[in-house]
Amino acid sequence: MAFLIKKAVLPFFIVFSCLTAAQKPDSLYSKPEQENIKYPQLQVKGLFQARYLVGMSEDVDVNGLHHSDHSGTDNNFMIKYMRIQMRAQISKRTEVVALANLADFKNDPKSRVLENAYLKYTFNPKLAFTVGQFRPWFGLEETYPIDIIKSLDWSNQYIEFGKLGWTSFQIGLSATGQLNLGKIPFQYGVSVVNGNGKNQVNDNDNGKQYSTRLVFGFSEKHNLNFGINGGIGEVFGKKIYALGLDLSSLIKFDSKWSLDMQLEAKQATNHPLYFAADPETRPKNPDEYLIRGAYFLPNIRYEINHRNLSAFELSCRYEYLDTNFRLNSNPRQTITPMFGLEFLKNYGARIQLGIQFDRYKYQVENTIQYDSNLFIIQVQSRF
C-alpha cells in the first residue's frame, strides 16, 4: 500500500497544480480579445550538418577505437544531422512539436529518427506542461539546440547522462515556468520520465526517474545564471540518483566583441554499468558504480556584419569524465579548440574547423579508451 501511495504522489500534485492554475485568472483572460488569428499555425524548420573527419593518431579510427591489427578508417565524410521540425500552434496555449533526424536512416532507425514528439500546454509564463518525447531540463546543455552549440558537439558528459536517462530525448511529463524571487529571475523544471531513451514502445521496468532543475539569474548585465539539478529514480528495483551544478555568463565588451562562458559538473549512479556487471560478484548497492564529469567552455565572438560574413568565433572546451571513478577509474580528458565562421545570422550557415584531443589515464588496446587526435571540418545550414 505504501508503494502505491508513493507512486501516486507526483501525479496527484501535477493534477492539483493544473486545477489550481486553471482556476486562477491571469492577464491572458483579463480582457475580451478581438483576434482574427486562425489555428492551427504551422511552422517548418530544418538543419543540415555534415563533417569531414581525419584521425591523426596511428591505429585509431575516426570513432576513437584503437586497432592493434592496423585496420580501421582514419578519414570519413559523414552526415550528422538532416533534421526536419514541424511546430503546430493549435490554440493560443497549445502547441504540438515533431522533430525527426533523417540522417539516422543510414543506421538502424528502430530507436532513432524521431527525436521530439510532444504536446505543450502553457497556462501562463509561470506554468507550462509538456507531455511526450522531449528533452527534460537537467543541465545547461538542455537549454539550447545542437545547431547553436559553441563547440563541435555535445559534451561527453551530456552524451553519457543521456544513456543514463537524465538528458537527451526521453519520454514522460514535465512542468516548467519562470517567475521572480524578489528581484532575482527564477526558472524551474520538474520532470518524470521512463528513463530508457527515445522511441521506446514501453518502459523497460516499473521504475521512473524524477528530476528538477532550478536556475537563478544573478546579473542581467552579464547574463549570469546559476543552475542546480537533482534527480532520483528506480531502475529494476534499485535506487539511483543524479546531481549537477552549472554556471553560464555572456559578457559583451562592446557592440562587436563578446565572451560566452559555460561551466558544468555532474555526478550520478552509472546503473547501465552496474547491471552489465556479473550479478554474482557485483555489490548490492549500485552507487558503487558512479560517473563524474565536468567541462568548461569559453567562446569569443566578433560581429563582422559584412554582407558575406556575419561573425567569427573562437572556442576551446576542456572536459573531464570518469565513468566509474569509485571502482575502476580511468578518467578521460578532452580538449577541443574550434574556429568558426558564420555566414548568415543566427547560425543560418557556418563552417567550423577544430581538433579534438583525447587523453586517458590508462590506455586499453582495441577499445575507445585510447589516446587520439581528430581533425574536424563541419558545415551546417539552418532553414
Image: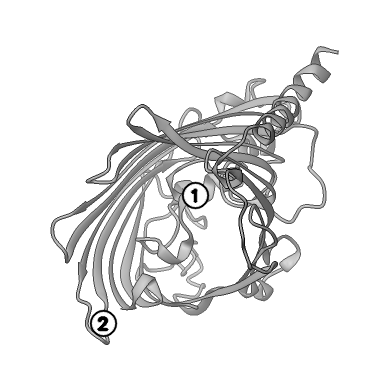
Q: Which residue is mark 2?
A: 309
Q: Would you say 241 lies left or right of 299 here? A: right
Element class at badge 2: loop
Instruction: Name the residue at the top extreme.
Output: 2
Amino acid type of the residue tagged 2 in the rendering: Leu
Q: Which residue is depicted at the point 67% across and 71% down?
A: 107
Residue 179: image quadrant is top left
Dot label at residue 321: none
The percent position of residue 249, horizontal first and vertical second, equals 28, 46
The percent position of residue 277, horizontal first and vertical second, equals 66, 35
Instruction: Name the residue at the right extreme.
Output: 1
Residue 75: image quadrant is bottom left
The percent position of residue 50, horizontal first and vertical second, equals 48, 77
Answer whether residue 64 is visible to the viewer in this image: no
Element class at badge 1: helix
Answer whether residue 383 is visible to the viewer in this image: yes
> What distance separates the C-alpha of mark 2 from that of mark 1?
29 Å
Above or below 293: residue 169: below
Q: Nearer the viewer, residue 263 or 187?
A: 187
Residue 204: image quadrant is top right
Q: Which residue is depicted at the point 83% across and 20% down?
A: 4
Q: Which residue is depicted at the point 70% across and 67% down?
A: 40
Above or below 224: residue 316: below
Q: Earlier in the sequence, mark 2 or mark 1?
A: 1
Question: Do the residues under discs 2 and 1 have CB atoms within 8 angstroms?
Answer: no
Dot label at residue 142: 1
Amino acid type of the residue tagged 1 in the rendering: Glu
